[in-house]
Image (cartoon, grey):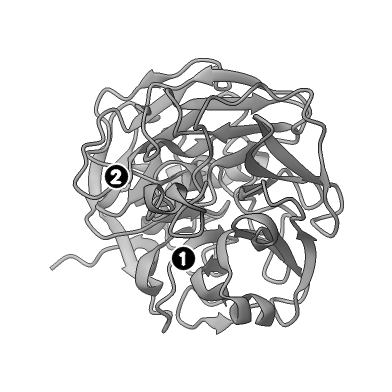
Amino acid sequence: MRLLGVGRGAWAGAWAGACAVALVVGALGVPAVAAGAGGVSGSGGGPGDAAAEAAAAAVAAGSGAGAGAGAGAGDVGGVVRGLRGVGWAVKGTGKDSRFRGLAAVSRGTAWVAGSKGTVLRTVDGGRSWRDVSPPGAVAEGLELRDIEAFDARRAVALSIGEGEASRVLRTDDGGATWSEAFRNPDPRAFYDCLTFFDSRHGLAMSDPVDGKFRILSTDDGGRSWEVLPATGMPDALPGEAGFAASGQCLVSAGSRDVWLATGGGAVSRVLHSGDRGRTWKVAESVIPAGDPARGVFALAFRDRTTGLAVGGDYRAGQASPRAAAVSSDAGRTWRPATTPPPGYRSGAAWHPYGRGVALAVGPTGTDVTADGGRTWRALDAGSFDTVDCAGDGGCWAAGEKGRVGRLEMLERS
């Protein structure tokens, strides 16, 4: 969606700042596969996987097994009990970019991408960060709004904007070098988000072109991309688009299921495909829309059926009632949270060990649910834009002014 001055005409002002938040429901809702398991950050795998189930059982037994490097039993145990006693430990990056793209590979390894073409990577739990920004992206000041990582060396990043500003970049060597895998040739297209099902298959989505959302597909790990036929895509509503706020307007779970979140139209909607983006079905969400600044900003699916949606009105000071919703039927129907977050949220993620535990983030704070998204309570008042959790239980958040945090046990005074 045309946000933060990158859109043309009236769009630029109407959407200014709409991409600012990303920590609500998607990052913990689609947990990454544990490092070394051959998975993709944010691409599913979920708590139903045998490794995650075994780790969860070990944690429940008090052993802390499977918690990952640097994680103690108390760390993950606190998360499983509804994140009691934990909070964001801010990790200094030395940068002032706004990081709306985040890929949690493990407790030790994470990637962030943001404004000014900036990409950072840590492999030591945030104690140090390496600037691995693509030189061309820095030179052109590209807005990198999404990043998906397969491990500590391989990652795919998306820059947003109209026409050629929308690009896909890829690295195989930890960011030492980058290759441009796709540059959008259509001035009518504006790509917002990308997702991967596994290390080979992925999709990216654009705001509507000729009245329909456009889907880009890869089957070689992001090295090449093709536009999918629009025949299976429902018509978009007038004014409808996606929010490039947190990299969570397009999310996947399992090997073939993917969901797309919208706003800006008369109603906010969630589109679902069970065949990797070839055909789609659409459902209305219960999150208010009817204005270019309102709608669903992020999705998170724990598995093929259980999902969260978060959003609201991104404008500061505007009320965001019913800012969260839940689905138990693959997004065919949505129910409002009985106790939603108190304000707009742009990112969300499920924790891989606690089946009902998820996080939602936004500019006014972080909220947590322990009952699958029905009720939310405040966890932290700091500003973040996006959130993601790895399969080993490592949860990360990122946002404005270079702010990155990792979920940790808080010291008691």
Q: Is residue 116 above or below residue 213?
A: below
| Residue with the most extreme front position | 9
Can you say which quadrant of the picture contains the C terminus? bottom left
**Disc number placed over residue 377 in the picture, else none:** none
Q: Nearer the viewer, residue 181 or 112?
A: 181
| Horizontal arrangement in the rendering, residue 286 relative to residue 122 (left or right) | left
| Horizontal arrangement in the rendering, residue 147 relative to residue 245 (left or right) | right
Q: Position of residue 301 (x, y in %)?
A: 54, 34
Residue at left offset 45%, top offset 48%: 11
> Please, what is the three-letter code of the amino acid marked with disc 1?
Phe
Q: Position of residue 306 (x, y in %)?
A: 52, 26
**Disc number placed over residue 367 in the picture, else none:** 2
Decide if residue 118 is in sight here.
no
Judging from the image, what secondary structure is the residue with disc 2 in?
A: strand
Q: Nearer the viewer, residue 17 or 387?
A: 17
Quarter assignment of residue 368: top left
Label 1: few (<14), some (14–19) or many (≥20) C-alpha neighbours in 10 Å: many
Residue denoted by label 1: 99
Label 2: few (<14), some (14–19) or many (≥20) C-alpha neighbours in 10 Å: many
Q: Earlier in the sequence, mark 2 or mark 1?
A: 1
Residue at left offset 67%, top offset 82%: 135
Q: Position of residue 408 (x, y in %)?
A: 36, 62
